[in-house]
Amino acid sequence: MSVVTTTVSHSAVNRSGSSFLRRREVPVGAALLFVLVGTSLSNHRFLSSQGRTDLMLAAAITGMVAIGETFVLLMRKVDLSVGSTLGLAAYVAGSAIKDGGDGQLIKAFAVGIAVGLCVGLVNGLLIALLDLPALVVTLGTLYVVQGIQAKIVGGTRITADRLPGDFVSFGVDRFLGVPKLMWIVLVAGAIASVYLRHMRSGRDLYAVGSNPPASLLAGIPVRWRTLGAYMGCGACAGIAGVLFVARLGGVDANAGRGYELAVIAACVVGGVNIFGGSGTIIGALLGAMLLRSIGFSLSALSIPEFWQQAVNGALLLVAISADRIVTLRRERAERIGQR
Amino acid sequence: MKQLNRLQWDKFVPVLVMLTLLVGSFSNEKFLTTSNMTFLIQSIGEIMLIAFSMTFLIIAGEIDLSVSSTAALSSCTLGFVWQHTSNIPLAVLSALAVGFVCGAINGLLVTKLGLQSLAVTIGTLALYRGLCFALLGDNRLTPFPTSFTSLNFKGLFGTWVPYVVVPLVVFGVAFGVVLHATRLGRWVFAIGQSKDAARFVGISVQRTVLAMFITNGLMAGVAGVIYTIRFASARPDGAVGMELEVIAAALFAGVSIFGGVGTMWAVASSVAFLGSIRSLLRLKGANANELTIVTGSLLLVSVVIPAIGVRVSGRRHSRSPLRGALDPAPTGGADLGNRGTPDEPQVLARP
Amino acid sequence: MNEPVLEVRGAVKRFGGAVALNGASLRLSTGEIHALLGENGAGKSTLLKALAGVHRLDEGEITLHGAVFEQGSTRRSREQGVAVIYQEPNLFPDLTLAENVFVGRQPRKAGRVDWATMKERSAELFDLLGVHLDPDRRAAGLSIADQQVVEIAKALSVDAQVIVMDEPTAALSAVEADRLMDVARRLRDRGAAVVFVSHRLDEVFSLCDRYTVMRDGATVGEATIAGSTPGQVVQLMVGRELTEFFPKAEAVIGATVLEVQHLTSRGVFEDISFTVRAGEIVGLAGLVGSGRSEVVRAVFGIDGYDAGRVLINGEPLNQGSPREALRRGVVLVPEDRRLQGLFMPASIDRNIAVTVLDKIRRRGLIHKRDERNVAQEWSQRLQLKHQGLGEPVDRLSGGNQQKVVLAKWLATNPKLLVIDEPTRGIDVGTKAEVHRLLGELASRGLAILMISSELPEVLGMADRVFVMREGSLMRELSRAEATQESIMLAATGQASVA
C-alpha cells in the first residue's frame, strides 16, 4: 500500500517538474539557513557585520580546499594530503613574500599554486600511472609533505609584521561587504562549477566516478583525467594555503593539520558522493559553510565550542545515512514499479 | 622482482626490525640500551594494540579511522569517572565500555545501513573527538592516583621491560592465533577476498564484520587506558592522528588495502620497525619532522614496489591460461577409472 | 535497398589451444534484421566481440562496404559505424539519459557543452525509437529494457549502420521484448543492418528476415526465415553427436532428498515445484535469464523468497541461511566460479578446506596437517594439476579451478549437490571428467540438481529434466521424452506448438 503511494508521489513530483527542490543542495542550504536564522534570532550579534566577516573568512579556507577535493571525490578517489599541502603552500608562499614590499599578491598565489601542483602531480602520477590505491598514496604524501613543511619551517614562524602590509590587509579587507578572501573562493568555485558542468573533460570526471569500466569503453582518457583532478586538487589546496597566511597573518609548522578530514566531511555533507559520480561545487561550498556556521553558532549560543566537532561528525553521519536511505527507498520503489 | 611481492614482503618485515636493531646498536651506543628500549616499547604500545585489531578490519576489506578519537574518548571517560567516583576499576571498565560502544556504532552503521566504512569512520572520528571535549572541556585531568600511573615506571619483575609488554604479547599472540589458526580468521580472509563467495560457504558476513568493528573499538579503548597511564593524564586532544600511524603501519606490513591479504607478524614487526627507525633517527638528532618524512616515504615505497612487482609478475601470469590450455588434454576416462575402485569409496560417500 | 554492408569471411579465433571460431562467416545487408543463432559455445559471442573491437581475428577478414574493417579497437569499431549492444548495458547511473547517449562526445557550442542541443537530440532519438524516456532523468534505476534503448540511441547518435544486439530480450518481459522488437524494426526501416541474437525462436521467426546458424565455431547454414521452419533451424543448431558426453551410469533411485513446493519470489520466479531423489540427477534447463539460477539460490538460502517452502529429507529448511543449508547437507556450486566459487588469491588448500573448517579444528585451532590432508585427498581424487597445494587458485586453468570448486563442496559430504553450469568455460577433457564424476556421485546415492545451458550435457546426464521459461516451470521431461528439440521448444515457448 505504502509502496504504491510512494510511486505515485514520485511520478507526481516528476510531473510537476520541481526538480529544483529535489536537488541535493537544497536540504544543505535549508539547514544552513536554519542555523543562521535560528542563531541570529537568539543572538543579534551573530550576523552583525563583524560576525558575518568572521564566519566567511573561516569558511573560505575550508571551502577552497573542498573545491579541489570535490574533483577527486567525484572520480571515486580521495586525497588525504590536502591539509599538508595547504600548510606547505602557506609557508612557502609566506616565505616568498616576507620582508618584501607591497604588490606581491600575485607572486604569493603563483608560489602557492606551484607548490600545490607539485604535490598533486606526485599523487596523480602514483595513482593514475601505477594504479595504486588513492587512500594509501595520499596518506603517504600527507606524511611526507607534512614532514617537509615542518622541516623547512623548523622552529621559525612567519608573523604578520614580516609580511607585506597590503598582503595582511588583503586578508581582512572586504569588497561589497564580502571579505576579499571569500571572493577568491567564490570566483574559483564559479570557474570550477562551470568546468564541471559545461566542459567535456569536466563531465568526464562524473562519468569516470559513476562507472569506471564503462568510461574506459567510452574512450575517456581515465589516466589523464585522474592526473588532472589531483593536480587541480593540489592547486586548490595551494591557493587555500595562501588564503591561510593572509587570514591569520602568519604561519607555523602546524598549519593545515587535520584539514583533510574536515574538508572531506564538508564535501560529503554537501552531497558529494564518496563513491564518486555525483555532487557539485555549490554543494561542497554549502557543506563547508554549514559546518563552519554550526561552530560559530554554538559559540554565539554560548554552547561550549567543544561541541562543534561532535556536531560536525554527527552531521556527516546523518548526511550519508540519509542519502543511503533515500537511495534504498528509490531503488525499491523503482524495482516494484517495474513489475 | 619476485622477491618483492607481498608474500615475501611479510617475512621480510621482521628481518627489517632485526637489521634496524643491529645497525642501530653499531651506529649509536645509546640505541640498544635498556632505557632506550623501555622508551621505545612504551612509545609504540598503543599503536601496536590497535594495529592488531585494525589488521582484521583491513584484511576483511574495511577500515576504521575513528580509533584515535575512540582511544581519547576512552581515556577521557577514565578520567571523568575517576574524578567523580574515585574508583579506578570502575573507571577502567567504563573506558573499555566506551571503546566497545564506539566500535559498535561504527559496525552497525556499516553493516545495517550498508555505508562505506571510510565515510562512517571519518564521521565518528570527529564525533568521538567532539565528545571528548564535551566531556572534559578544554581541561586535562591529572588527578590519578600514583598507584595507577606508576605502573608505567615499574619494569616487569624489576627489569627494564615495561609492563606494557604484557598486554602486547598477550593480545599479539591472541590476535595472531585467531587470525592465522582459527575458523574466524579464515572467515576474515574469505570476506576480504570475496564477500560473495564467503556467503556461498555459509559465512555470516555482516555478523563477522560487526564483531570486528566492536573488537577494534575495544582495543582502542584498551589503548586509551594505556595512554592515560603513560602520560598520567586524560586530555581531550590526546592521541590525535594516531589512526593514520596505525593504518600506515598495517599497510607497510603488506596488508592490502583492498582486503584479503596480510599477516599479524608482519604488522607487529612493522609497528616495531617504524618505532625503532624513529627512535634511532631521534638519537641521531633527527627531529620529529624528519621522522614524519621517513614514515610517509616508507609507506609509499611499500606500495610502489609491490605494484611494480605485481605488474612484472602479472604479465607473466597473463600467459598462464594459455599455458594451461596448451597442456595435453587430460585423459579423463583413464584417470577417473581408478577412482571407482573399492579401495577408496569412503571418500565419496562418507556416512 | 538490400546491398551488402558487412561481410565476415573465414573467421578463425583461437584462445590458447581452444578454437572459438573456426571458419565462421556472416553477410549482412542494409535494411534487414539478421538472426545469429547457435547453442551456447557455438562462437556467436566471439564473433560479436570481433565486430565490437574487443577481439582481433587470427585469420579471415571483415569488410565493411567493401573496404577492410579495422579490428581490435572498440572506439574504432564505433567510429566505423558498428555498434554492439550487450545484454547487460553499461550506462553511467549518475548521468542523465541525454548525457549517457553522448558521453565523451557531448555536442558543444563555443567550447561549452550544449545541454539544450544534447537534450533535444536525445529526445529525438528516443522519439525515433518510439519510447517515452525523459532525457533529463538520471540513468540510475532504469529498467534493463530502457537501458538497452539508451544504448541503441547511443548507437544511432553516431549513425551506426550495423547494430548488433546480443540476446537483448533474454532479461526482458514479454511487453518489453515486444517494444524492443518494434525498435529493431524501426532501425531496419531506416536502412540499418540489425544483427539479432536470441534463443527465442518465436521472436526470431516473427522479427527477422534472414538467419545465420553457427555451430562449433563455424557457420553451418544461412537462409531466409520465410523459407524455413523452426524445426529446420533447431536441427541446424543442435546437429551434434553426443558421443563426447558420458551418459550417466545406472543408479538406484532412493528416497526424495529435496522437495520444493510452490516456491515464489515475486517478479523473479513463480510457483516452482519439483523434487530430487537420492541417486538421481535432475536437470534444470532453460534459457539464460529464465530464472534457473535464482531458484537454486533461493533454495540454498542466498536469496529470500515470498512464498512456498523447501523440504530436505521431508523436514522444512528455513529460508535465507546458507549455513543451515550446509548443515543439512545441501551445497550449491555457484555459476560464477571466479566471484562466487573461489577465493582467487588464496591457496588451493585454503579454498578446499574453507567448507570443512569445523572438521579440521582441534580445541578451536585449525589443524594445518588436517587441512592439508583434506586438500591432498580431494586434489588427488579429482586429479587436480597443481604445483603444490599452496599455489593460489588464480594461477590454475579454468578446468582445474572448477575441480577446486567441486572439491571444496564435495569435502562436506553433501546429500544434495546443486550445481550451476558445471562445465562452463572448461576444456573438453576436464568436462568429461566432471561428467564422469557427477555420474559416479549419483551412483553412490547423492542427489544432484544440475543447471546447464548445454543441451547435450543435460541429455547425457539427467534422469529427469525440468524446463523453465520466464520464471515458470514449463515442462517435466523424463529421460525418454527429453530430446534436444523437446527441451529447446519448451524453453523458447513453443511447447504448445510442438
Image (spheres, rainbow, N blue to C red):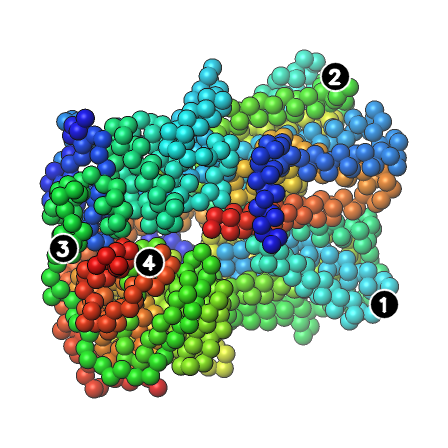
Which residue sits furthest front? Answer: C497
Q: Position of residue C304 (x, y in %)?
A: 48, 64
- Categorize mark 4 by other alpha carbons within 10 Å: few (<14), some (14-19), many (20+): many
Sequence-wise, the earlier of marks 4 and 3 is 3
Q: Is residue A184 above or below residue A311?
A: above
- Categorize mark 1 by other alpha carbons within 10 Å: few (<14), some (14-19), many (20+): some
Give a yes or no on whether discs 4 and 3 share a subunit.
Answer: yes
Q: Looking at numbered disc 4 in the image, what kind of residue is underneath it?
A: Arg
Separation of residues labelled 4 and 3 (CA atoms): 21 Å
Q: Is residue A199 left or right of residue A315?
A: left
User: Which residue is drawn at the image coordinates 45% and 81% (left, top)?
Assistant: C315
Separation of residues labelled 1 and 3 (CA atoms): 89 Å
User: Which residue is drawn at the image coordinates 60% and 54% (left, top)?
Assistant: A1
What residue did someone put label 1 on? B86
What residue did someone put label 4 on? C469
User: Can the viewer see residue B199?
Assistant: no
Q: Which mark is residue A175?
A: 2
Q: Position of residue B65 (x, y in %)?
A: 61, 51
Q: Is residue C467 left or right of residue A72?
A: left
Q: Nearer the viewer, mark 1 or mark 4?
A: 4
Q: Looking at numbered disc 2 in the image, what kind of residue is underneath it?
A: Phe
Residue placed most toward the observer, B90 or A147: B90
Q: Looking at numbered disc 1 in the image, what kind of residue is underneath it?
A: Ser
Residue placed most toward the observer, A88 or B23: A88
State the SS at label 1: loop
Q: Is residue C460 left or right of residue B192?
A: left
Give a yes or no on whether discs 3 and 2 share a subunit.
Answer: no
Q: Are marks 3 and 2 in contact (CB under 8 Å)?
A: no
